[in-house]
Image: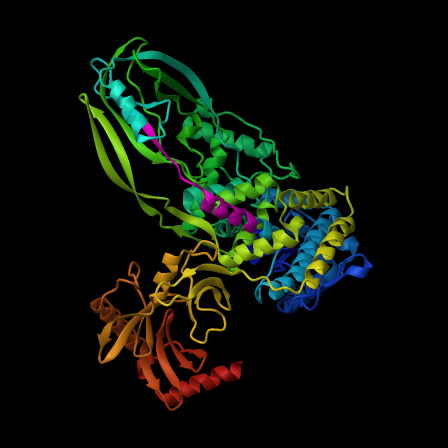
């Protein structure tokens, strides 16, 4: 045992740190938090000032025993958990649980895992910051109180096994409110007019858009009629040089957003990959709301930019954070060594590192100089104007490396215009009036939800990944696609003095990888909004977050935050419990034209469903709602289509083939066996031949799956996803290496099972 024991949260971090410290240091991992609030009961003593009741997690008892033994042998214990509130709390819990004496305990922090950073941290140890610990403790207690008291109410009022969280409920409300905004949106048609004009001797036309939209086809046609004999000219040309500045370096929130836009990463994937990069010493700490860069980082980035692109491309920039509660002592997310253009690692690690590298380098590069040209085109006899915009890059600057992505951006790039002068005559190649529709606000993607939560000051960027994944796990939302719908539109074209009308077709409203609310999520939101208004108030939730920030700075006592919140909240809980009424979310969809029975949409034991017939009807029928269908918006047409299943497709080998939709999607049923439909196959249109092909394919897979079958002992040798294995009942057993699965006898299988049982 060395003289010094260093304790960090993860084995990967421990491994990286060990490389920089000498033999007198031993580095061990706590594997995250070693204790938390008691799971049995509330885990909080409300009567004695909300005192938390902590316990060591069962799976951490061995870790705690090992760390206790190691700490007793060490002369000095260095607590090197992360430099945020969560990391500070881990350090405090370690100190308390291991019984570390203050005189031999040191707290060290660093925002990058490099030799210099770690040695500097050891040179400058500090005490555990109890203000940060109390801020984390206040958040944990408040979230436990909300979850513990709200969840049982949801079980009684809506459905068993539901739960609610403080930040998650607000995020859910955003998604639900947006869905209802979209449902209420009335798309209105309009006509956009675009013209194509040629100057004398030019090969490429100028494409321009009219500065007025027309509400009806008649108005658009009347305008084109006026343009038939019109002589067009350049009315004005306005040129100006604009500076484009780079985006600041990444914070946790902006990294999550940009990785979603550019790499297609989910928020949780981004944080997981960034964690690995940090622990390998490749980037600075990934949980930060600071845009600050250290003096050393500014210097090394300037060297890299100058070396790669030249001195003209370098511009040193200092960024300051505008986020409330941000800690300027921390740094933005950047490579630990900007000179490392490439890294070793997985494909996802390389892609995320490359994104961070580009953003860091670009923010220390010169502005891009762009010449923008605005052109106004007008006819002699019309008041409306055609507007064209051109853009020419004079100096690319930071654009050489990086352009920031946007949410729901349109792929419209300003054109390079030919040389033009005011007063020039133009030849009109054609004018087109196209019918368009106003668009509803876009559904939230993970990136745009994170952006909105940060704008509202709700939660903290480090919690956004768990917020989204929790909502998906609970079944309150799904991450999916909206297929859109078919739509006809009209196009009027003026060319060579004649107006031609074309009827065209388009697919509209399609959205990909969006967060969509489920019926149960909408019900929970409605119930909380009606009974616990503060919980869902954006302003109130942001105020609570500010209170935690004040606790972290020592400006507010942690128990006052809890007291102020809990009093009114608990009163609402008691009022809600006194109201014994069950919250039914039922909606009459319509009447079945064949049977005359009502069709009702409601929540069932396994989720949202449709019921044909009253509750006391012994012959009532049920069918689950399809993916993306909601209780409050499912139509009678949708319902009748769902009740058309199960559908008889045909027969095979004397047995009927039917199709239906179950909990896991559409399927074919034959001779008591279920086979999932292939992607793109529809249970309403699949043919008998296609169904038989699926059945045969399934049988072929099953035949290959079974290597050996011993019915007497209930043992099978099967081919699995990760190779052959033995199955008995619900238990699976590994086959020893160098054992040929095809030669296994029943006795050999029993022997393998027996050995495995003894090991247990």
Residue range (magenta): 172-192
> Does residue 81 show up magenta in the picture?
no
Which residue ends up furthest to the right in the rendered image? 48
Q: Nearer the viewer, residue 72 or 64?
A: 64
Do we see residue 340 in this rendering? no
Q: Nearer the viewer, residue 458 or 233?
A: 233
Q: Quadrant of residue 716?
A: bottom left
Asked if 378 appears above or below 257 in the picture, the reply is above
**Viewport quadrant of the N terminus:** bottom right
Asked if 649 appears above or below 99 in the picture, the reply is below
Residue 30 screen position, x and y as percent:
63, 60
Q: How is the image coloured?
A: rainbow
Asked if 108 appears above or below 95 in the picture, the reply is above
Q: Nearer the viewer, residue 271 or 60?
A: 271
> Does residue 191 show up magenta in the picture?
yes
**Majority secondary structure in the magenta region:** helix
Count how many numbered circles sit on residues in the image: 0
Q: Residue at x 24, y 37 (%)?
A: 503
Residue 85 is left or right of residue 470, and the answer is right
């Amino acid at each position: 045992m060395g003289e010094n024991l260093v304790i960090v949260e993860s084995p990967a971090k421990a491994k990286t740190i060990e490389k920089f410290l000498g033999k007198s240091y031993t580095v061990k991992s706590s594997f995250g938090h070693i204790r938390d609030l008691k799971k049995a009961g509330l885990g909080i003593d409300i009567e004695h000032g909300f005192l938390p009741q902590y316990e060591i997690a069962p799976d951490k008892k061995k870790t705690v025993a090992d760390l206790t033994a190691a700490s007793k042998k060490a002369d000095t214990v260095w607590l090197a958990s992360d430099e945020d509130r969560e990391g500070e709390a881990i350090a405090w819990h370690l100190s308390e649980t291991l019984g570390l004496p203050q005189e031999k305990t040191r707290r060290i922090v660093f925002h990058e895992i490099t030799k210099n950073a770690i040695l500097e941290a050891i040179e400058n140890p500090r005490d555990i910051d109890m203000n940060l610990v109390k801020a984390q403790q206040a958040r944990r207690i408040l979230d436990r109180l909300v979850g513990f008291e709200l969840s049982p109410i949801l079980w009684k009022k809506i459905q068993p096994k539901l739960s609610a969280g403080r930040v998650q409920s607000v995020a859910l409300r955003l998604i639900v409110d947006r869905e209802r905004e979209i449902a209420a949106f009335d798309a209105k048609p309009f006509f956009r007019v675009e013209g194509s004009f040629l100057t004398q001797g030019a090969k490429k036309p100028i494409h321009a858009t009219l500065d007025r939209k027309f509400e009806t086809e008649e108005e658009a046609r009347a305008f084109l009629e006026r343009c038939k004999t019109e002589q067009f000219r350049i009315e004005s040309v306005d040129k100006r040089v604009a500076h484009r500045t780079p985006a600041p370096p990444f914070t946790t929130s902006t990294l999550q957003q940009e990785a979603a836009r550019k790499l297609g990463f989910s928020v949780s994937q981004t944080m997981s990959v960034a964690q690995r990069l940090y622990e390998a010493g490749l980037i600075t700490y990934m949980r930060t709301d600071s845009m600050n860069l250290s003096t050393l980082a500014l210097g090394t980035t300037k060297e890299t930019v100058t070396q790669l692109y030249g001195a003209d491309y370098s511009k040193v920039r200092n960024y300051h954070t505008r986020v409330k509660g941000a800690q300027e002592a921390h740094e933005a997310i950047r490579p630990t060594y900007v000179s490392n253009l490439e890294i070793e690692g997985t494909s996802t690690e390389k892609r995320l590192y490359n994104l961070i590298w580009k953003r860091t380098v670009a923010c220390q590069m010169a502005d891009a100089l762009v010449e923008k040209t605005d052109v106004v085109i007008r006819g002699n006899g019309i008041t409306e104007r055609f507007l064209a915009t051109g853009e020419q890059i004079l100096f690319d600057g930071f654009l050489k490396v990086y352009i920031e992505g946007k949410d729901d951006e349109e792929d419209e790039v300003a054109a390079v215009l030919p040389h033009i002068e005011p007063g020039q005559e133009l030849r009109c190649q054609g004018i087109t009036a196209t019918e368009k529709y106003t668009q509803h606000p876009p559904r939230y993607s993970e990136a745009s939800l994170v952006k909105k939560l940060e704008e509202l000051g709700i939660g903290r960027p480090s919690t956004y990944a768990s917020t989204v994944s929790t909502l998906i796990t609970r079944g309150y939302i799904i991450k999916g696609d909206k297929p859109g719908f078919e739509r006809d539109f009209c196009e009027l074209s003026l060319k060579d003095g004649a107006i031609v009308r074309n009827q065209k077709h388009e697919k509209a409203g399609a959205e990909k990888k969006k967060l969509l609310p489920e019926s149960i999520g909408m019900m929970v939101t409605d119930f909380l909004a009606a009974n616990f208004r503060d919980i869902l108030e954006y302003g109130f939730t942001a105020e609570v977050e500010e209170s935690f920030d004040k606790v972290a700075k020592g400006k507010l006592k942690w128990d006052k935050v809890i007291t102020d919140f809990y009093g009114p909240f608990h009163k609402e809980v008691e009022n809600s419990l006194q109201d014994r009424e069950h919250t039914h979310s039922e909606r009459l969809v319509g009447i079945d034209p064949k049977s005359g029975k009502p069709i009702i949409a409601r929540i069932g034991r396994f989720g949202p469903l449709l019921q044909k017939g009253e509750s006391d009807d012994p012959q009532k029928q049920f069918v689950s709602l399809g993916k993306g269908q909601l209780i409050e918006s499912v139509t009678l047409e949708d319902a009748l289509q769902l009740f058309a299943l199960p559908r008889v497709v045909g027969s095979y080998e004397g047995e009927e083939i039917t199709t239906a939709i179950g909990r896991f999607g559409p399927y074919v049923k034959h001779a008591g066996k279920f086979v999932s439909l292939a992607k793109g196959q529809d249970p309403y249109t699949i043919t008998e031949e296609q169904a038989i092909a699926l059945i045969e394919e399934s049988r072929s897979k099953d035949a290959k799956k079974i290597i050996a079958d011993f019915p007497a002992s209930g043992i099978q040798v099967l081919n699995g996803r990760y190779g052959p294995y033995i199955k008995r009942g619900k238990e699976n057993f590994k086959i020893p290496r160098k054992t040929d699965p095809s030669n296994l006898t029943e006795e050999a299988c029993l022997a393998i099972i027996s050995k495995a049982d003894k090991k247990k």
